[in-house]
Image (spheres, rainbow, N blue to C red):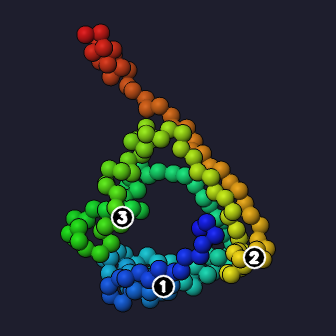
Amino acid sequence: IQNSKISPDMIANLPAGASADSITDGTCQAAKQAFDNPDDFSKKGGMAGMGKAMKRGMVLVLSLWDDMLTKMVWLDSETRSKIHPKSFPGIKRGPCSIQAGDPNTLRGQHPNSKVHYTNVMVGEIGTTFGPTVGANVLDVVATPAPTPAPTVPPQQQQQQQQQQQL
């Protein structure tokens, strides 16, 4: 639900029998096979393991973050592969360029980034929308922690000062 509009589940059109509008052990296994990814989901117990973990209790975490290691390409760009062409299923994740998620660029272009989460609701399935909403509504603002300035080694500082004097 976004802006009071309910969006139906999307049917993922995946090869190897993974097309579905819900998550099952079978769709997860088929997707891992179709994308040539290791099946760590099944090794961790699959849907039954997820259910056990949820019974132990989980914490919802919402954040504004970036990723120095992968530059967020896993989310909306293109993952690199040494063995598969760009046309292989799962390589293209979205329309963004590989450079678009570089944290140094993003932090430079948007130093005061923040996000405002509103109307976050928690409740049993089917109880968090509609005219008789009975769940608690949360209103949260997250701002990123300041990034420390990079440390320049003393020898490099001297070189920079010498270049500026020229």
Type of amino acid at the residue the image marks with label 1: Asp
Residue at image x 75%, y 76%?
131
Q: Secondary structure at mark 1?
A: loop
Going from N to C along the chain, the mark reached first, 3 or 2, is: 3
Q: State which quarter of the image contains the C terminus.
A: top left
Residue 27 in sight from this viewpoint: no
Which is more toward the observer, 40 or 67? 67
Q: Which residue is mark 2?
A: 131
Q: Give the x, y percent position of residue 126.
A: 68, 81
Q: Residues within 10 Å of mark 2 (few under 14, many from 20)?
A: few
Q: Is residue 143 left or right of residue 133?
A: left
Give the camera-side residue of 68 and 15. Answer: 15
The quarter of the displayed image where residue 16 is located = bottom left
Q: Percent position (x, y) of residue 77?
A: 34, 60
x and y percent of residue 161 in the render?
A: 33, 14
User: Label 2 vs label 1: CA separation?
Assistant: 26 Å
The residue pinned by badge 1 equals 21
Query: Quadrant location of the N terminus?
Result: bottom right
Q: Is residue 19 left or right of residue 125?
A: left
Number of other residues with Cα within 10 Å of mark 1, as a class: few under 14, some 14 to 19, many 20 or more: few
